[in-house]
Image: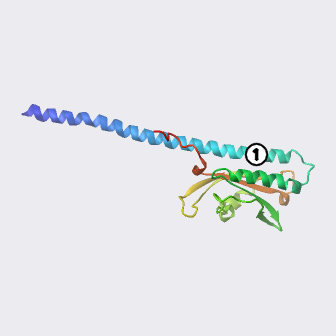
């Protein structure tokens, strides 16, 4: 009779390693998925930063040109960037001592207003920079917007520069990692 009890107990103990392996696989899958999504977000962010920096390099390449003469190229480039899936992009121009939006916005990210955040206003005192701001669009999930901003042209006086702002969130990623599993 004792052999039967020992046998059942041993069988039960044999299940514990399999349960641990299962739990470790689930946790490992979650970790890999999360790491992949984070890497994809950073890749998208770097891509947007490079696009803004390329525009700035083109603008700064001609220091003999008046700063206002760059307006159309900057605005058109930023408006194109803003049409990309879930990417925030806007350009601001100083008018009578305040920054006014001069680019058209697309619907996906149009409700986001960076000047509503004191940390953004403080950050733009620099020539360029990166900041993460959390916000919640109407009837959507909260998200962190990874923002890059840059003043251009740098050769112009402080009050004669355009402020280009671009940002991405996890919703900007179009390819979903491990979606076939």
Residue 152, given in percent of the width and then of the height, sits at 81, 52
Q: Where 175 sits versus 99, above or below?
A: above
The residue at 67%/43% (across/down) is 46
Nearer-the-camera pick, 41 or 126: 41
Residue furthest left as drawn = 1
Residue 117, given in percent of the width and then of the height, sits at 65, 63
Nearer-the-camera pick, 29 or 6: 29
Residue 70, given in percent of the width and then of the height, sits at 85, 53
Quarter of the picture holding the N terminus = top left
Query: Is residue 91 in view?
Result: yes
Q: According to the image, label 1 marks what residue?
A: 53
Left or right of residue 100: residue 134: left
> Element under label 1?
helix
Residue furthest bottom as drawn = 96
Quarter of the picture holding the C terminus = top left
Nearer-the-camera pick, 178 or 60: 178
Residue 47, given in percent of the width and then of the height, sits at 68, 43
Please tell me in which quadrant of the rendered image residue 5 appears. Answer: top left
Number of residue marks? 1
């Amino acid at each position: 009779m004792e052999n039967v009890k020992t046998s059942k107990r041993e069988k039960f103990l044999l299940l514990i390693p399999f349960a641990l392996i299962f739990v470790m696989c689930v946790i490992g899958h979650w970790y890999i998925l999360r790491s992949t999504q984070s890497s994809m977000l950073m890749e998208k962010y770097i891509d947007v930063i490079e696009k803004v920096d390329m525009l700035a390099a083109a603008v700064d390449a001609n220091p003999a040109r008046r700063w206002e003469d760059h307006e159309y190229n900057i605005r058109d480039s930023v408006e194109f960037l803003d049409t990309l899936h879930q990417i925030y992009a806007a350009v601001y121009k100083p008018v009578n001592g305040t920054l006014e939006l001069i680019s058209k916005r697309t619907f996906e990210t149009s409700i986001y207003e960076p000047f509503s955040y004191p940390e953004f206003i403080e950050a733009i005192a620099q020539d360029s920079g990166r900041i993460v701001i959390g916000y919640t669009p109407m009837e959507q999930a909260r998200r962190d917007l990874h923002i890059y901003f840059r003043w251009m042209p740098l050769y112009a006086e402080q009050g004669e520069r355009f402020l280009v702002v671009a940002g991405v969130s996890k919703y900007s990623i179009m390819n979903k990692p491990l979606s076939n599993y």
